[in-house]
Structures are given as structure tokens and as C-alpha cells.
Image (spheres, rainbow, N blue to C red):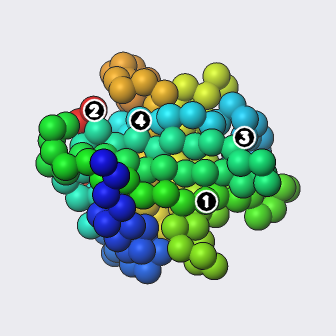
Amino acid sequence: MKKPGTLLMMALLFFGCTSNSQKMPVDVTTVKKLEVEKYMGTWYEIARFDHRFEHRLTGVTATYSLLPNGKIQVVNAGYKDSLQGKYTSANAKAKLPNPAEPGKLKVYFVPFFGADYFVLDLDPDYQWALVGSSSPNYLWILSRNKDMDTETYQMLLNKLKARGYAIEQLIKVIQ
């Protein structure tokens, strides 16, 4: 059974709150090419900066599907405290405001109030993605698989560190 409460609150907090956890500037340059159709499907959250809206969530996924009008249906879901915990999900819509910047999307959990969704880096085969925001306080490592090998994970940490992110603040997500 879907319970929109927790993840809806997650979305509202994402829009309205920023943390001072990341004080140094980071490179939020996005990918220059994004094949939206290839990006669709389910992504598993491997690691993230922890926030109130995702605090204690495990088994977190983001599932994207292309809508007939060109927008993207977003379903974020996870379990509270453990993989056997209470299931919660939130629905949103995403769009690409400027086709000249394909890595910069906006996600709307509530109408007229969009959050930045920046695809910072992307595997050529769309097997992993680094996602951030215009704020340095939001960061996710996503994968098509529940598990990520140590070598790939370390390579992604190195990429994020080179961009100026405080990678020591990442938490690994139980999948």
C-alpha cells in the first residue's frame, strides 16, 4: 500500500530547506547529452547526503517513466528503518525546462514549485548516475542494480571529490 505522507514531506522539505553541511563551492556542471528514453526505468539509491526527507529510509528507488506529453512521471519509494519497514512513496512530475541543458531537469512534487534535478555524470550505458542540485547539499549515487562493485563506487567517489563534494557526508543506503 502506498503511503504518500513521508515522501511528500520529503519533497516539500527538499524544496524549502537547505542545509549548511556543505560550505565550499562545488562543480554542478551537468551532462551535455541525456537520452531521456534510456534514463527511464528504476534506479537504486546507492548513497546520498542524508536529509530529513529521507532520514532512515532504506531500499530507496526512483522510477521514471515517459508520459505522452513529454514530461516524466517520477515515483520515489523506500522503507522506514529496514527493508521490512513501512513502505512509503511519493509521485512527482519532471520536465526539461531548457533543451540546451539536457542534464538540468525540474521535479515537481507540488504544482508550480520545482526542485533542481541535475544529472552531474552518467555512465555511457546508463548503469550509474551522479545526481545533484544547484545546491551543494543534495547528492545521490544511483545505479540500475541494487549492488555496486567497490571499484565503481570508489571511482564515483573520486569524481565527486574532484567536484568539491564532501564525500565523507555520504551515507550508503541499504538495498
Kindly check if marks 2 and 4 are in contact, taking CB atoms under 8 A apart as contact.
Answer: yes
Residue type at tag 1: Lys
* Residue hosting label 1: 93
- How far is disc 4 from disc 1 in space, using C-alphas? 18 Å
Q: Of the residues under marks 2 and 3, which one precedes in the sequence?
A: 3
* Residue hosting label 3: 36
- Up-down: is 9 above or below 174? below
Instruction: Say which of 72 and 48 sits in front.
Output: 72
- Up-down: is 150 above or below 102? above
Q: Of the residues under marks 1 and 2, which one precedes in the sequence?
A: 1
Instruction: Indicate the quadrant containing the C terminus: top left, top right, bottom left or bottom right.
Output: top left
* Residue hosting label 4: 44
Residue type at tag 3: Val
Residue type at tag 4: Tyr
- How far is disc 3 from disc 1 in space, using C-alphas? 14 Å
Q: Is residue 115 left or right of residue 46?
A: right
Residue reaching furthest to the right? 100
Q: Residues within 10 Å of mark 1 (few under 14, many from 20)?
A: many
- How far is disc 2 from disc 4 in space, using C-alphas? 8 Å
**Residue located at (37% from left, 48% from top):** 77
Instruction: Say which of 28 and 7 sits in front.
Output: 7
* Residue hosting label 2: 175
Instruction: Say which of 64 and 140 sits in front.
Output: 64
